[in-house]
Amino acid sequence: MEAAESLFHPVAIRNNVGGYDKEILDRYKEPTWNNPVVRFVGADGKDVIPRKDRVWETGPLVGRMHASLAAAKQDIPAWFKVLAAETASGEVETAVFAMT
């Protein structure tokens, strides 16, 4: 979440309503009622990296975030490079800590 919020400008477009959301779907030739798609577009509205659907897991999504930053020639923070390396395999471990 921190990466999405601090390195990008997230926008949600609903794929099952009319109006402005439907105009955006039409502009990007996205079907209505499709599965969620994450696109990385520049200020000009063009894709920074090619569109790809079915990217729902952390590792592949972080990899695409990294690729889009690199393609846009944006500075990639060290902490995000570490995140990308740690999640590249797709095997993310979870640990739960408790304090009393």
Image (spheres, rainbow, N blue to C red):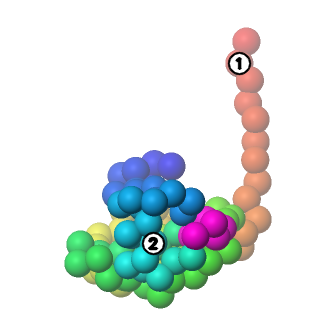
Residue 92 magenta-highlighted: no
Q: Give whichever of 29, 52 is nearer the camera.
A: 29
Residue 25, labelled with which disc? 2
Q: What amino acid type is highlighted by mark number 2?
A: Leu
Give the x, y percent position of residue 51.
Answer: 51, 83
Rendered residue at 36%/52% (across/down): 6
Read off the magenta span. Answer: 32-37
- Tally of marks: 2
Q: Residue furthest left?
A: 44
Disc 1 vs disc 2: Cβ atoms closer than 8 Å?
no
User: To which quarter of the image does residue 8 belong?
Assistant: bottom left
Give the x, y percent position of residue 78.
Answer: 40, 62
Q: What amino acid type is highlighted by mark number 1?
A: Met
Circle 1 Cα neighbour tier, 10 Å, few/some/many (<14 / 14–19 / ≥20): few
Q: Main secondary structure of the magenta part?
A: loop
Residue 35 magenta-highlighted: yes
Q: Residue furthest top?
A: 100
47 above or below 80? below
Pointer 1 residue = 99
